[in-house]
Amino acid sequence: MFLGIETSCDETAAAVVSTDGQICANIIASQIDDHARHGGVVPEVAARAHLTLIDEVIEKALAEAGIRMGDISAVAATGGPGLIGGVLVGTVTAKAIALGGDIPFYGVNHLEGHALTARLTGNVPFPYLMLLVSGGHTQLLAVRGPGDYIRYGTTLDDAAGEAFDKSAQILGLGMPGGPRIEAAARNGNDQAFVLPRPLENKPGCHFSFSGMKTAIRTAYHNDIAPLPEGEERNASVADLAASLERAIADSLGSRSERAMRRFAEDHDVARPAFVVAGGVGANAKVRSRLEEVAEKRGFAFHAPPPGLCTDNAVMIAWAAIERQKAGDAGDELDFTPRPRWPLDPDAVPPAGRGVRT
Ligand code: KG4
Ligand code: ZN
């Protein structure tokens, strides 16, 4: 039984997963109400909330699994990347548990947690191609084993999740942005607005989303923002939300298609898998667009259930289990949390401004 702890952003989560892949407990306490009034996640508020919630969340996880702390064989916490105050709360808690119980401690890369979830939920064999789309990252990677990644592409500016979140704010939909846009889009016409598809047909597998956000702002002010009384608009927030969702799904789909070609050249696998991971992977339009592209290119598509795409502690426990199976006995208790922690440290930064790793 591995105890997993996730505290890198605005969810305080704990989970118990057995080494054969049974999810025995999965507890997530969201802090969204604490942050919504600020219009975004405030790091100091998050760190304090993690501190308040963490003990209770772990107790709930143990209770749900029907075990006691002494039954845990290893403890894993997100060691980065993420908001450092929260990561400190999680790692210090996990280290204390490891020290008290004389069990191994794993400082897990949060992105590796997302990356390896598909092996828990879909038994996907290495190597596979992954699109990691979350609030802070949009990356295409070849996943070859724990700690073994080759990055094909990343975003030059905003992450896809950020495009959802910032657009939701512009449209007055509030937080959490992605799910609010998805809900609004259900009643909209996705052809109503022509939004840019940045980098379309450009070589390589990088992404760019900041132009989309600007286009949303312009469209909102020109076509949707309330008019003086008596005048009516014929386009709605729902139309713009639906058009945005389609534009993001298209963009993710077309760049993923390029990565599939490269993956097939680099790896001799008969029917390789294409996996989506991270919060934006919870979006139904995004999932179906990616599935279409995978189908076309002869890749087997796998998307974890939406609840395991967004942040959770199951993936943290599972990543540690994968590491242990690969012969990694864990980290020392002087492990230092890492606000930045790329999966492929050797990836060449893309040319362009505002580059994220
Ligand atoms: O992986 P995640 O939970 O946290 C990070 O590691 O960033 O991803 C959060 C991101 C947010 O930007 C959120 O708006 C987006 O995932 N997201 C969605 C949906 N659910 C979460 N975006 C679009 N549609 C959704 N249903
Ligand atoms: Zn995440």
Image: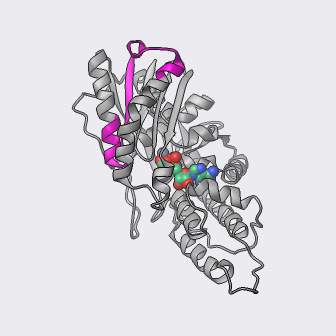
Percent position (x, y) of residue 59?
A: 44, 24
- Judge from the rendering whether residue 238 lies leftward or rightward of residue 148; answer left or right: right
Asked whether residue 302 appears in the rendered view, the answer is yes
Residue 190: image x %, image y %?
A: 74, 66
Residue 315, given in percent of the width and then of the height, sits at 49, 33
Residue shown at 65%/66% (left/top)? 244
Q: Is residue 82 magenta?
A: yes
Does 92 sit left or right of 45 as displayed? left
Counting from the top left corner in percent of width and height, residue 1 is at 46, 17
Which residue is at 58% across, 64% downward?
Answer: 168
Q: Closer to the camera, 144 or 63?
A: 63
Q: Residue furthest left?
A: 334
Q: What span is colored magenta in the figure?
A: 62-90
143 w.r.t. 253: above or below: above
Instruction: Name the quadrant containing residue 104.
Output: top left
Q: The C terminus is located in which quarter?
A: bottom left
Say left or right for 93 vs 184: left
Residue at screen point 39% across, 34% down: 54
In this orientation, does residue 253 appear? no
Between 51 and 296, which is closer to the camera in this rendering? 51
Residue 77 among those drawn in magenta: yes
Which residue shows up at 70% across the image and 60% down it? 184
Furthest residue toward front? 229
* Above or below 120: residue 40: below
